[in-house]
Image (cartoon, rainbow, N blue to C red):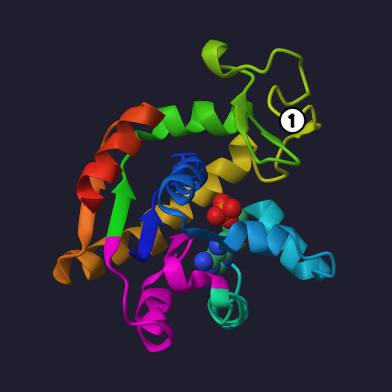
């Protein structure tokens, strides 16, 4: 199977697409953000950086990624979500793993991203994403997941102020990575908004 990278600004739906693709193709979803958030012994300075939407040191990220890519379950293919976030990470990845097949870039207008981030609530158990500000994405009960009945939570970095910071970092640090993969002829850009339409387009690309 294939190894994929998903690149997109905050709130574009990388995580949602990654979950759908993993299910269809039996891939492993590697989200650096999720790996960081799931660490119970994360030190205060790292927690603070995540809270403020500041990128974590490349060395720490490489360590996390190397450990994850060492596990056997990636043999059938994986999706990298939230990595690489800058050119240095993209170049470093080449020394860890050579066979990245496809890089998908989800292009979404800033205003749309802002709405999605401000209303985003996520199931603490199954990871399903809802939105309290978008009618068709609201959960039936305010803070309970429709799928597994677990509690819905807001990410600490999903505020307007932090979104601005994350978006800024994305433009300055992450966008240059697109050029890197374009030169390698691995980059596919999708500028759709509906999650099913995006998914179908990715499936078409993978064929
Ligand atoms: P995400 O869940 O991808 O939105 O990431 C949440 C936060 O985790 C980011 O705002 C960064 O603080 C940190 N983070 C995630 N991935 C990376 C990465 N590849 N490099 C540096 N920091 C990262």
Which quarter of the figure has residue 85?
A: bottom left
Which quarter of the figure has residue 30?
A: bottom right
Q: Is residue 129 above or below residue 138?
A: below
Is residue 31 located in the magenta-colored stretch of the structure? no
**For residue 30, side relative to residue 145 (left or right):** left
State which region is magenta. Answer: 73-102
Neighbour class for label 1 at 10 Å: few (<14), some, many (≥20)?
A: few
Secondary structure at numbered mark 1: loop
**Percent coordinates x, y for residue 2 in the rendering:** 33, 64
Q: Is residue 130 above or below residue 198?
A: above
Q: Is residue 125 above or below residue 25?
A: above
**Percent coordinates x, y for residue 32 in the rendering:** 58, 63
**For residue 170, side relative to residue 19 (left or right):** left
Residue appearing at x 61%, y 81% in the figure: 67
- Number of marks in picture: 1
Residue appearing at x 56%, y 42% in the figure: 163
Q: Is residue 117 above or below residue 137?
A: below
Residue 152 visible (yes or no): yes
Q: Which residue is farthest bottom? A: 95
Q: Between residue 109 and residue 204, name the one nearer to us.
A: 204
**For residue 107, side relative to residue 66 (left or right):** left
Q: Which residue is mark 1?
A: 148
Which quarter of the figure has residue 70?
A: bottom right
**Percent coordinates x, y for residue 18 in the rendering:** 47, 49
Is residue 95 located in the magenta-colored stretch of the structure? yes
**Percent coordinates x, y for residue 111 in the rendering:** 42, 28
Q: Between residue 72 and residue 174, name the one nearer to us.
A: 72
**Image quadrant for the N terminus?**
bottom left
Quadrant location, ligand no. 1:
bottom right
Residue 193 visible (yes or no): no
Residue appearing at x 36%, y 61% in the figure: 4
């Amino acid at each position: 199977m294939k190894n994929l990278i998903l690149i997109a600004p905050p709130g574009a739906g990388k995580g949602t697409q990654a979950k759908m693709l993993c299910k269809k193709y039996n891939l492993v979803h590697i989200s650096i953000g999720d790996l960081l958030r799931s660490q119970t012994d994360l030190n205060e300075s790292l927690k603070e950086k995540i809270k403020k939407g500041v990128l974590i040191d490349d060395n720490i990220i490489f360590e996390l990624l190397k450990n994850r890519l060492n596990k056997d379950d990636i043999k059938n293919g994986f999706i990298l979500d939230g990595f690489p976030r800058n050119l240095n990470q993209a170049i470093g990845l080449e020394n860890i793993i050579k066979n990245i097949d496809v890089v998908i870039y989800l292009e979404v207008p800033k205003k749309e991203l802002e709405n999605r981030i401000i209303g985003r609530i996520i199931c603490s158990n199954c990871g399903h994403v809802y939105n309290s500000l978008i009618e068709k994405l609201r959960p039936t009960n305010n803070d309970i997941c429709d799928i597994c009945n677990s509690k819905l939570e807001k990410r600490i970095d999903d505020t307007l102020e932090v979104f601005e910071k994350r978006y800024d970092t994305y433009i300055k640090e992450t966008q240059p990575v697109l050029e890197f993969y374009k030169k390698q002829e691995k980059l596919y850009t999708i500028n759709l908004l509906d999650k099913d339409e995006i998914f179908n387009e990715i499936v078409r690309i993978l064929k």
